[in-house]
Amino acid sequence: MATIQLEDGALQVDARIVAEGLRVDASLVQERMREGKITSLCERGVDEDDGRYRLTFFSESRLLRLVVDESGKVVERSAIDFAGRPLPDSARKPGG
């Protein structure tokens, strides 16, 4: 089963989760991350969102967003497909 784990303050996301959301083969996820073709952003919740994390993964034309609780359970999931067009700058992480 694909999982998300929080260990020592770091989130580990199974490549199958990212692959499914970005519609790529799981075997390509790490390679594309090293190449900068898949990037990510992790945001830690505050106040009423304390204990939650928002993970956003960006590919060339798709965005995957997951909100997970402190146990690693996905509580929200969304994806945007830009139909083969590049992601607009406004959809990318700052500096990405």
Image (cartoon, grey):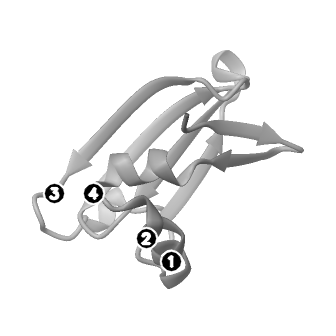
**Quarter holding residue 46:** top right
Q: What residue type is labelled 4?
A: Arg
Q: Report the disc number at residue 82.
A: 3
- Choose the circle earlier in sequence order: 3 or 4: 4
Front disc: 4 or 2: 2
Residue denoted by label 1: 31
Pointers 3 and 1 in contact (C-beta within 8 Å)? no
Q: What element carries label 4?
A: strand
Residue 50 in the image, given as x and y percentages of width and height: 72, 23
Residue 82 in the image: above or below residue 96: above
The answer to whether the residue labelled 4 contacts the one labelled 1, judged by CB atoms less than 8 Å apart, is no
Identity of the amino acid at label 3? Phe
How far is the residue under mark 4 from the one under mark 2?
15 Å
Label ID, residue 62: 4
Sequence-first tag of 3 and 2: 2
Assign the N terminus to one quadrant of the image: top right
1 and 2 marks in contact (CB < 8 Å): yes
Could you tell me which residue is drawn at 59 percent across and 29 percent down? 68
Q: Residue at x 45, y 55 (%)?
A: 57
Foreground: 49 or 67? 67
State left or right for residue 84 relative to residue 75.
left
Pointers 3 and 2 in contact (C-beta within 8 Å): no
Q: Helix, strand or loop at disc 1?
A: helix
Q: How far apart are marks 3 and 2 (CA)?
A: 20 Å
